[in-house]
Amino acid sequence: MKISVIGTGYVGLVTGTCLAETGNEVICVDIDEQKVQRMRKGEVPIYEPHLDILFERNIKAGRLKFSTSLSEGLDHGEIIFLALPTPENGDGAADLSYVLGVAEEIGNLITDYKVIVDKSTVPVGTADKVKKVIAESAKCEFDVVSNPEFLREGFAVDDFLKPERIIIGSSSEKATELMKKLYKPFVRSGNPIIVMDERSAELTKYAANSFLAAKITFMNEIANYCEKVGADVDQVRKGMGTDSRIGKRFLFPGIGYGGSCFPKDVKALQKAGREKGYDFKMLDAIIKVNKNQKTILLPKIREYFNNDLKGKTFALWGLSFKPETDDIREAPSLAIIDHLLIEGAKINAYDPEAMTNVERLLGNKINFGSSMYDVLQDADALIICTEWSIFRTPDFRRIKDRLINNVIFDGRNVYDLQDVEKEGISYFSIGRKDIKL
Ligand code: UDX
């Protein structure tokens, strides 16, 4: 099939590349001339595991092309994916100006039947708005479909190729059939394509992300309470997670969720609810608890250093909001860094992928090291913010040799308590007993 994808961010690029992988002819359109030039040469503009291999293969095969011309994209595709940014505007709602701006141009430019697909996370009612805007100037038939993505950064390619489900919000039989044909190769393993109306599809995305954010946040509160009563959240998590109604996943406590989706989507749903006179009390609590959770390690750090962090140096492992990505949007590391700097501390940070992004944001306010051990030299303590695999089995001897105090503050519960205790290191984590040596 002939497919066009408008917007080459995380979602657009993964969608375009994976659709080319199953033999479709794909054109990805972006207004950024330089980015398009780089992609034409085979350069992947984001860090996403496995994307580079698929990218190269499909460009070589001539199935994946790039353009800055929206009209070229609209001529080419029978299905047009809108994978445009929907950033949070000043008051927490999703800003639809990119989506509606492109919709207006689509209306002016299309000359034969197209299925326009909303792939971005958009508030309920957006498909109707897009339909209305296109209809104002369109001279041919078209349908608008809502097809939210459920891609996790770091696993986006896998999630796209082997989705647990595909949601299609459509009220047109013709468009639904085309979408089913497009996605057929991805659901051969038996996972369902669920067809519903556009509004329900739009809400499914917000409901799923907010529910996952709630699950994490609930566990974070249980972890905080574990510390008060001497329980171990690892044990509680295992005990709870084996109940299949609860499930094992997304129960890992830590220093809060971040990223481009959960924070934005929870706030957008809360805001959308208010606009309709519905007050999502749970969402208010999730936002509040998560904000607090990001700095939950700080009281422990302050207490260890007798409330005087001035002039102390902290080695910090992990800057990205989670492993396997260079994304630092809403990353808990940034909240911790902010507070430590205000209190006069210095920071030596290391992250396998995200240092360039943090340097762009913070300049020389913090130092960056060339390796995870490098940043430990003469630091007063180690703080872990992201559970990259490389941090999981460190050489504890090298940690002890370099740190001034043998102490680790771990925001992701990376180590077994017994292992660290055996190494003679003081260890403070989330929802588990503190090891004070
Ligand atoms: C999420 C959704 O999973 C995906 O379906 C959606 O389309 C986009 O948003 P992503 O933001 O890439 O994906 O990351 P995810 O792996 O879901 O993690 C989100 C955040 O929750 C991270 O900050 C992570 O550290 C945190 N998290 C996750 C926990 O704190 N505990 C957990 O048990 C799981």
Image: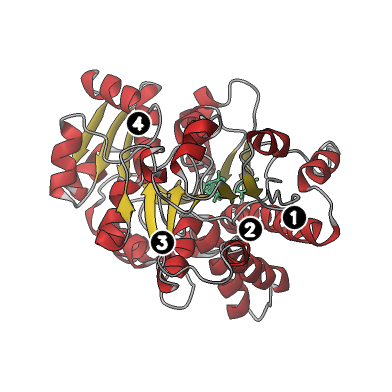
Relative to 128, residue 315 above or below: above
Q: Earlier in the sequence, mark 1 or mark 3?
A: 3
Q: Is residue 82 left or right of residue 232?
A: left
Say which residue label 3 marks. Answer: 130
Residue 403, percent from left and from top? 47, 45
Kindly state the secondary structure of the residue where label 4 is placed: helix
Foreground mark, 2 or 4?
Answer: 2
Asked whether the residues under the numbered discs 4 and 1 touch, taking CB atoms below 8 Å apart as contact, a structural biologist would say no
User: Observer-nearest residue: 186 or 179?
Assistant: 186
Is the residue at mark 4 in contact range of ligand 1, meaning its CB lies under 8 Å from it? Answer: no
**Three-letter residue code for mark 2:** Ser
Which residue in the structure is indicated by mark 1? Answer: 223
Write the residue at 47% across / 56% down. Answer: 333
Q: Position of residue 365 (x, y in %)?
A: 30, 63
* Nearer-N-terminus badge (1/2): 2
Single out the mark in the foreground, 4 or 1. 1
How many C-alpha atoms fall within 10 Å of the one at disc 3: few (<14), some, or many (≥20)?
A: many
CA separation in Å, label 4 and label 3? 25 Å
Mark 1 element type = helix
Q: Can you identify the residue that label 4 sits on?
A: 17
Q: Amino acid at mark 1?
A: Ala
